[in-house]
Amino acid sequence: MNATVQHALRDAILGRDLPPGASVTETAVASRYGIARQTARLAIERLVADGLLRRAPHQAARVPELDAQDIRDVFDSRAVVEQAAIERLAQAGSIPAEALAAHREPRALAEDAPFARIDATFHRALVAGQPNARLARMHELLMGEIELCIAQVQAGRVLLPAEIGAQHQAILDAVTAGDAALAGRLAREHVHGARDRLLNQTTH
């Protein structure tokens, strides 16, 4: 049950049913999902640990409000890790099955359909599928805030599913071809492009 509630809360945050700044209390979560407060507390604490919620001492957890500096920090850190991971995938010339499955899903989405969960799954699977376990651990530490940024990209419509799908396909083609330099460059440009569009929208 705890994992189910975590997934439901995660989807609510990424879908902006719980918008940035929203308070997430044990009582509200318990009532919303018909669960015990202890179960609600565990789910909230897991999402705090993942970076999808923040909690100040003696206060309720809240959905983070990411400012321009947060966005720069998250995307820049993400670019370093993902470029290195995708270069290693290209050296092996193989693509994780979960990443391929996530890549195919956006093609069926309408232009206004939600894509944050799918996009996060794609990137997580690529990094998890390469052989360097430390890179995967570093990426996982960032994933909560990465997902928040992807949700912000989705909410602001700064990138549409068709654009994301085309960029993903180019990365996958380079990986399959074994071109590590190209795959890494495309991965970095993909992340930085989203960063720049989101920053442009955030600061205007």
Image: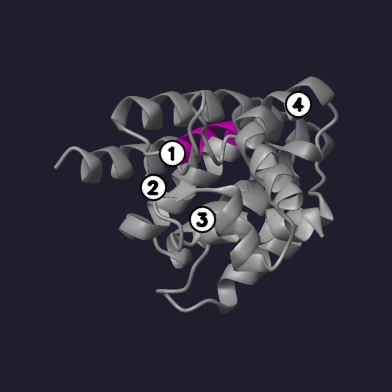
Please report the residue visible at 51 percent of the width from the left and 53 percent of the height from the top.
Answer: 167
Please determine whether, in this image, residue 176 is positioned above or below residue 160: above
Amino acid identity at mark 2 = Pro
Secondary structure under the numbered disc 2 in the rendered image: loop
Measured in 3D between alpha carbons, the distance from the residue under mark 2 to the one under mark 1, in whole angstroms, is 5 Å
Please report the residue visible at 70 percent of the width from the left and 47 percent of the height from the top.
Answer: 43
Mark 2 touches mark 1? (CB < 8 Å)? yes
Residue 64 - label: 1
Circle 2 sits on which residue?
20
**For residue 139, side relative to residue 154 (left or right):** right
Magenta extent: 181-191
Give the quadrant of the C terminus. top left
Q: Is residue 77 magenta?
A: no
Measured in 3D between alpha carbons, the distance from the residue under mark 2 to the one under mark 4, in whole angstroms, is 26 Å
Mark 3 vs mark 4: in front: 3
Circle 3 sits on which residue?
14
Residue 189 - label: none
Please determine whether, in this image, residue 105 is positioned above or below residue 190: below
The quarter of the picture where residue 140 lies is top right
Secondary structure under the numbered disc 1 in the rendered image: loop
Sequence-wise first label, 2 or 4: 2
Is residue 175 visible in the rendered image? The answer is no
Secondary structure under the numbered disc 3 in the rendered image: helix
Amino acid identity at mark 1 = Pro
Measured in 3D between alpha carbons, the distance from the residue under mark 4 to the one under mark 1, in whole angstroms, is 22 Å
